[in-house]
Amino acid sequence: MSVRHTVTVHDRQHGTVLQAELEEGRYVLEGFEAAGKPLPFSCRNGCCTTCAVRVLSGELDQREALGLSHELRSQGYGLLCVARVKGPLTVETQDEDEVYMLQFGNAFGKGQVRRAIPLEEE
């Protein structure tokens, strides 16, 4: 018999609270979908920020979250598509653009992009 934990998602964008009993080690997004409670997602690979959340209580196993820096993970952010249940968990959905800017904003908007190699004329 597998250990199950209560996972609660406060969906800020829709003003709702979703809850499911999920097996330890199961992906949160997949578990909620199986329970008929779909959550926002896009890539399902941990590379974008559509399914980003902030952990309010509990802990995620999110070693596969390529779309979040270690710094953001340490600040409590997670990506539900590649986050596995470790125990009881409560999270809050985040604004995708806000998390994207926290993750990637420092790399953009710093002036003109210059080509290292000039394009050949046809």
Image (cartoon, grey):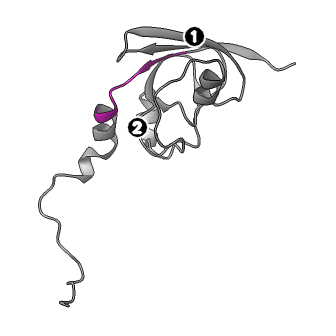
Q: Position of residue 21 (x, y in %)?
A: 68, 13
Residue 5, x across and y down, in percent: 69, 14
Q: Which image quadrant: the N terminus?
A: top right
Disc with the residue nearer the chain's start (2 vs 1): 1
Q: Which residue is outermost to the right? A: 1
Label 2 and label 1: CA atoms lie apart by 21 Å
Residue 98's place in the image compared with 2, above or below, is below
Expressed as whole percent of the image width and height from the top left, the position of residue 89 reads 58, 16
- In terms of secondary structure, where does tag 1 sit? strand
According to the picture, the residue beneath numbered tag 2 turns out to be 49
Residue type (three-letter) at the residue carrying disc 2: Thr
Mark 1: amino acid: Gln
Residue shown at 41% from the left, 29% from the top: 75
- Between 101 and 17, the residue placed more toward the observer is 17
16 above or below 97?
A: above
Q: Which residue is mark 1?
A: 19
Q: Quadrant of residue 117?
A: bottom left
Residue range corresponding to the magenta coloring: 90-97
Q: Which of the two residues, 74 or 25, is positioned nearer the viewer here? A: 25
Callout count: 2
In the picture as drawn, the residue positioned furthest to the left comes out as 111
Quadrant assignment for the C terminus: bottom left
From the top left corner, tell me how far across and down residue 85 is, in percent.
Answer: 65, 25
Crowding at mark 1 (Cα within 10 Å: few <14, some 14-19, many 20+):
some
Residue placed most toward the observer, 72 or 27: 27
Q: Secondary structure at mark 2?
A: loop
The image shows residue 16, relative to residue 114, as above or below, that is above
As for residue 99 lying within the magenta part, the answer is no
Residue drawn at 41 percent across, 38 percent down: 71
Left or right of 119? Residue 8 is right
